[in-house]
Amino acid sequence: MRYIFERDTWQEIYGAIRKNKMRTIITVVGVTWGVFLFVFLLGMAKGLDNSFKSQFNDFATNSMFLWGQQTSIPNNGFKRGRGIQLTLDDVESLKSQVSDIEYVVPRNVTGRWGTPPGQFVRGSKSGAFSVFGDYPSVDKVSKKKIFEGGRFINEEDIKYERKVCVIGEDIYKQFYDQGEKAVGDFVKINGIYFKVIGVYKASRTGAEGDDSIFLPFTTFQTIFNQGRNISWMVITAKPDKNIVKTEAIIKKTLKRLHNVHPDDEQAFGSFNLGEQVAKVNGFLTGMKLITYIVGIATLIAGVIAIGNVLLITVKERTREIGVRRALGATPSEVRGQIMLESIMLTFIAGLIGFIFGTLLLWGINMLVKSNEDAPIVNPTVDLLAVAGALASIVVLGTLIGLIPAQKAVSVKPIEALREE
């Protein structure tokens, strides 16, 4: 193995590569492209994964939304088309009867689904916006980003039916000058004065946007005369429970409570966030798998190309190899030189591909990092995966180099010297 560290060995390898510059460059491009593609696709897949996680970072992913609709099947004397109105009694029943549930959050809103919006007035300015009636627990399933100096609704607000509100960032921009303090200000909602206690920033996964208003649930019920009715509820399953199975149990329970036929699928509308998250995770996993398949296939194709070129090189260097054998070069030395050439080409090509792929990902990250709505977030690549890829191409380069190396060793000195 000492010949590996000898200067003459590397000079011979350099000389052999230099004789066929264009062929070597074209061959190396195959492996470079394979590693570049592998790094780039892996980084983009990671960026999509990061983007998805950032969107749902403030939302419990094992959650579902449920609301009442109309029955589609007659049951126990009730005709089809009967409207289902959810109430606080349903919330209490689900809490006590469905053990898989962690949180049941009743919510109310006006200004959505055909209901009139709330009238917001500050000074001489006015506007119509959606008004939500919520409990503090909504913040546990859908985190609200409150600007510094403010707060969200708390239990005291609920208990004493306080006339306080949290407004969206868009409303703040419409009714307040830049830098003007909103917290502590008084505004009118449907002719009643409310104290602003916070300004929230919209979440990409929230249903509220940044042009809505939050009131304490009890205050909302009184002002908008809702009694015990609710618009919908957000339900979160316990961490060790399957939200899809929990949804089926919840609907079965509500059908029984509202005298709905067991086979009626129209009486309750729902959106299962956990199920959608699972689908997206499946898509991302599939994308990563495709990335590995495409990257590895491209790498193998590039390494095979290097082997083919080395076979041609061995054929062209038959006379040179014969002279070396005649001067005393051992088969292992001849074999080692060809294999070193293969390993060196694959490693350098892979390293160049890694550098270019990383630089491109860095450039993309610089372009999108200031854009909160970008579909790609921090597209990085797992160094362990890249190290594995580089190690793999070195191994492949070694294995593929065995073929031309063995071809070189099989050259008989006398026959090689006769080669024209």
Image (cartoon, helix red, strand yellow):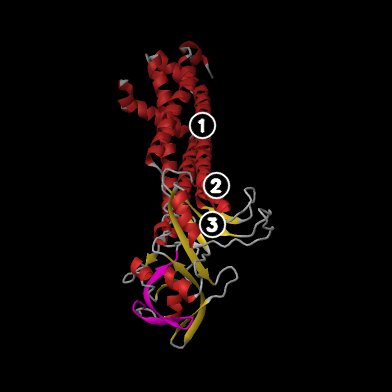
Find the distance from the CA under tag 1 to the CA under tag 3: 51 Å
Residue at the disc numbered 1: 300
- Per the image, the residue denoted by label 2 is 248
In the rendered image, residue 414, in percent from the top left (x then y), is placed at 48, 11
Could you tell me which secondary element the residue under label 2 belongs to?
helix
Quick check: marks 1 and 3 in contact, CB under 8 Å?
A: no
Looking at the rendering, the stretch of residues picked out in magenta corresponds to 182-202
Residue 66's disc number: 3
Where is the C terminus found, in terms of image quarters?
top right
Whether 349 is drawn above or below 51: the answer is: above
- The local crowd at label 3, few if under 14, some if 14 to 19, many if 20 or more residues have their Cα within 10 Å, is many
Q: Nearer the viewer, mark 1 or mark 2?
A: 2
Mark nearer the N terminus (3 vs 2): 3
Residue 391 placement (x, y as % from top left): 40, 32
Element on which disc 1 rests: helix
Which residue type does callout 2 highlight?
Answer: Ala
* Residue placed most toward the observer, 13 or 226: 226
The answer to whether residue 61 shows anywhere in this view is: no
Q: Is residue 298 above or below residue 416?
A: below
Sooner in the amino-acid sequence: mark 1 or mark 3? 3
Residue visible at 67% across and 57% down in the picture: 78
* N-term mark: 1 or 2: 2
